[in-house]
Amino acid sequence: MRAAITDQRLEDGRIRSGHYASNPGDLHGAFLIPSPYGTELKIMSSGTGHDADGWEHVSISTPRRTPNWAEMCMVKNLFWGEEECVVQFHPPKSDYVNHHPHCLHQWKWLGGNFPTPPTYMVGPK
């Protein structure tokens, strides 16, 4: 994650009161920002605090549907650089946690470079 939130869209949508309140510039917090597809994205960021356990994490949800690929890419680029690897996991069913029916998560491991398959295995460039 960047050293601080620098995108004005996030600062404009930062929740500043109540349980999820955070201060301007904080990496952690809750944000309500417009999607380019006409809905509101709710983003929760863990930041890089002592309780991160080696992971950076954001959750992304909308009120009525699961976020689409373009929305997930937009959020990824709000919190991380274009060349950083961020992943979505499909854990074993016994590890599922579902507090919101339309929520997806992005994770960045802080322990080094996360392994990725060679691009030719995904498809031609």
Image (tube, grey):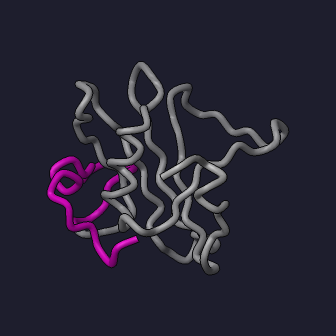
Q: What residue is shown at x 18% (from left), y 51% (from top)?
A: 9
* Residue 125 percent location from the top left of the image: 48, 52
Residue that lies at the very extreme toward the front in this rendered image: 124
Q: Main secondary structure of the magenta part?
A: loop
Give the percent coordinates (x, y) of residue 87. 57, 55
List the single residue furthest toward the top: 64
Which one is nearer the viewer's eye here, 5 or 19?
Answer: 5
Q: Say which residue appears at 28% left-offset and 41% top-offset.
A: 32
Residue 37 belongs to magenta span: no
The quarter of the picture where residue 63 lies is top left
Locate residue 98 relative to residue 27 in the image: left or right: right
Residue 113: name its quadrant.
bottom right
Residue at 39% over, 63% down: 28
Residue 95 position in % (x across, y down): 79, 43
Residue in the image at 82% along x and 42% along y: 92
If the image is split into quadrants, where does the N terminus sit?
A: bottom left
**Residue 14: horizontal and vertical position, in percent?**
24, 52
Q: Decide: is 29 above or below 81.
A: above
Number of numbered discs visible in the structure rendering: 0
Say whether residue 9 is magenta.
yes
Q: What span is in magenta?
A: 1-24
Horizontally, residue 3 falls left or right of residue 83, namely left
Vertical side of 44 occupied by 112: above or below: below
Looking at the image, which is closer to me, 69 or 125?
125
